[in-house]
């Protein structure tokens, strides 16, 4: 079992807010393992981007952001990540570090971040600076009318071998799952926290958030995002520690996709009607169209 410890300030306020702290609209969840060198720049970019998003006029894009927090989950790092996060938390009140007792993997760190998050929406991105925090604005502006927005890396700054493997993997996933998700490996996403907490949790589930959100009946949109060269360190993943696991996970997800559990409670205990009409629990009732939105489908996504 993994123990979660909270480090740093527990009640960050939106930039420029006065009075008592209020719950943020968006929680940015960043799993991090041995990324001490990348974190100062990453946290600084996220904070600058989202403070600017909160200060823009109401008529711009999807409107201003009503407060945010940055939840960085230290996944059992052995470098100076803990010290760096403590120092950054003293500078950026929006930062809420979470520390796992031992390395548990990206999926577990993401799940811990979702549970620690207090926003109505959660965004995810990697800690290695390859995802561009400026794209959080692009995803936020694409949200109206949708439950989730997934990024796809338009120009990947990776070796050709990694790009080729990802291309084949995406095609295989879509063929087996019957979906049209362009880049399941892209970590740039925004979706509702309530959906994040309902997603099946297993090792490797972070690679399948897009398919699993579709399983929940979410209205999903896909948008192109930037991708940058890795500035520090090396990737924790390679074909040796991913290939067989991903194949096994894909078969498991294909099974899950065919066995969703959906129900509605229409009456409470003691024979009283449920307040406000039918109350969805666990999984929502099926939507008329559970999948990629019509605009994305028209674009061949």
Image (cartoon, rainbow, N blue to C red):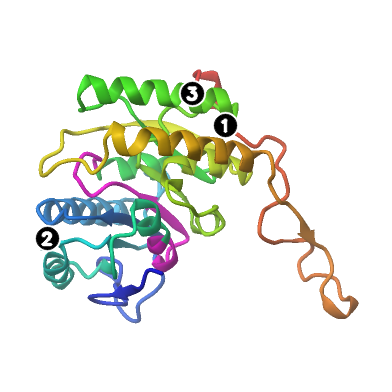
Residue 2 lies, in percent from the top left, at 37, 69
Residue at the image position 45 percent from the left and 56 percent from the top: 121
Disc 2 crowd, CA 10 A, few/some/many (<14, 14-19, 20+): few
Query: Residue 118 lies in magenta, yes or no?
Result: yes
Q: What element carries label 2?
A: loop
Q: Which circle's residue, 1 or 2, is located before the other in the chain?
A: 2
**Mark 1 or mark 2, which is nearer to you?**
2
Disc 1 crowd, CA 10 A, few/some/many (<14, 14-19, 20+): some
Confirm whether residue 155 shows in the render: no
Task: Give above or below for 155 relative to 225.
Answer: above
3D distance between C-alphas at marks 3 and 2: 36 Å
Residue 279 lies, in percent from the top left, at 74, 63
Query: What residue sits right under mark 2 in the picture?
Result: 79
Query: What residue sits right under mark 1 in the picture?
Result: 293
Q: Nearer the viewer, residue 31 or 287?
A: 31
3D distance between C-alphas at marks 1 and 2: 42 Å
3D distance between C-alphas at marks 1 and 3: 21 Å
Q: Which of 289 and 238 is in front in this view?
A: 238
Q: Which circle's residue, 1 or 3, is located before the other in the chain?
A: 3
- Report the span colored magenta: 112-132
């Amino acid at each position: 079992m993994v123990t979660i410890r909270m480090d740093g300030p527990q009640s960050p306020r939106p930039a420029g807010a006065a009075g008592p702290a209020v719950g943020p609209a968006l929680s940015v969840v960043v799993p991090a393992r041995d990324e001490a060198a990348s974190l100062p720049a990453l946290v600084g970019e996220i904070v600058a981007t989202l403070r600017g998003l909160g200060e823009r006029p109401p008529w711009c894009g999807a409107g201003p952001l009503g407060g945010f927090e940055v939840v960085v989950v230290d996944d059992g790092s052995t470098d100076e990540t803990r010290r760096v996060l403590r120092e950054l938390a003293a500078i950026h009140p929006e930062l809420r570090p979470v520390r796992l007792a031992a390395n548990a993997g990206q999926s577990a760190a993401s799940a811990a971040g979702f549970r620690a998050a207090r926003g109505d929406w959660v965004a995810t991105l990697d800690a290695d600076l390859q995802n561009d925090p400026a794209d959080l604005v692009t995803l936020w502006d694409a949200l109206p009318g949708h439950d989730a927005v997934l990024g796809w890396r338009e120009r990947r700054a990776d070796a050709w071998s990694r790009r080729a493997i990802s291309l084949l993997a995406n095609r295989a996933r879509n063929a087996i799952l019957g979906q049209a998700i362009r880049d399941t490996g892209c970590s740039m996403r925004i979706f509702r926290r309530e959906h994040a907490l309902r997603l099946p949790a297993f090792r490797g589930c972070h690679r399948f958030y897009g398919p699993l959100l579709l399983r929940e009946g979410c209205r999903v949109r896909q948008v192109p995002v930037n991708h940058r060269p890795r500035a520090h360190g090396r990737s924790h993943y390679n074909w040796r520690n991913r290939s067989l696991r991903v194949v096994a996970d894909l078969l498991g997800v294909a099974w899950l996709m065919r066995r969703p559990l959906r129900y509605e409670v229409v009456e409470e205990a003691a024979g009283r009607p449920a307040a406000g009409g039918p109350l969805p629990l666990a999984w929502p009732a099926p939507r008329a169209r559970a999948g990629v939105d019509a605009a994305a489908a028209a674009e061949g996504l």
